[in-house]
Image: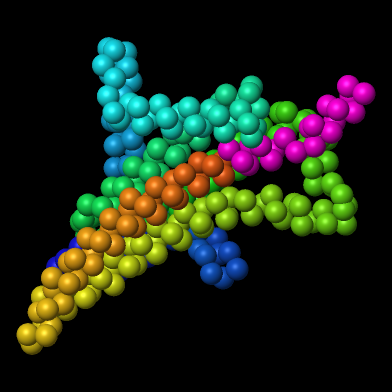
Amino acid sequence: MSPYLAAPGFHNLTPVCGDGYVSVLGVLNFYYCAFNFDSLISSGVGMAVTLVIALAIAYRVSHGVPGKLQLVLEFLVSYSQGLVRDTVSASATFVVPLAATLGLFILLANWLDFFPLAGPVQPANSMLNQTLAMAIVVFVLVEAYSIREQGVVGFLKRFTRSPSFLAPLWVLEEVVKPVTLSLRLFGNIFAGVLMVFLIGLLFTFGVTGDSFAAHIWAPLGLIFLILWKAFDVFFVGTIQAFIFMLLTIIYFGMAREGMEEHEGAHAH
């Protein structure tokens, strides 16, 4: 059976201490005592490839043998440094490795989707638990950075900015940041996996069909599959990695909201 016949979105859970879960609005169920091998395998492959490439580049740099891949990664890091300096602060250097690493990992994990995956294993970022985990890490670090820079009082003042009667909306805006950050990446990558599944059904119909007309769909389905994967993986996958990295930096910049007014008033 073709690997593309594995319906996307369905994963077998392996319970550790039961099947307990937390339901959100009756739509999303978060299992806190179970895991699925699909997510672990996909994430593990993405992390392994990222580490191998990063270590290989570091080795070549230390031995003075630059390559084309090194130039690409240097551009990624320098671009991240410029964004952090202009959007956050020149002193927030810790944001650069965080944003660049997330961008590189998401990019490579998305590009790996060009190769056929075996069985039910699907691209890492087509699973909400993967994208939500990265978004929660960014959210926690952003809030901690805001408290460190502005103090608890300054942090709370961010949610009472004018007009003050919209304070609940400012709080809601902050809380939904990891949700929107994770759903944007998940939705785009999952949509690509779903399209691959549908095109795979077309290819399977052409292979298994008895009529001559049915067999025509086999090569057409294969051509559509290659073209779609090239577009979805290398174009959409690259754009989504860039957007996640960019939003991570922007959120750190937003964590400093109100500091300019405070510093200006203090200087005055």
Q: Quarter holding the C terminus?
A: top right
Q: Quarter holding the N terminus?
A: bottom left
Question: Residue farthest to the right?
Answer: 268
**Residue 169 point in image, percent of width and height:** 77, 57
- 159 sits to left or right of 122: right
Magenta stretch in the rendered image: 249-268
Residue at 50% across / 41% down in the picture? 245
Q: Main secondary structure of the magenta part?
A: helix
Q: Is residue 17 visible?
A: no
**Residue 252 point in image, percent of width and height:** 63, 37
**Residue 224 point in image, percent of width and height:** 23, 67
Which picture quadrant has residue 221?
Answer: bottom left
Which picture quadrant has residue 106?
Answer: top left
- Does the segment drawn in magenta span residue 190? no
- 266 sits to left or right of 77: right
**Residue 15 point in image, percent of width and height:** 38, 56
Question: Residue farthest to the top?
Answer: 63
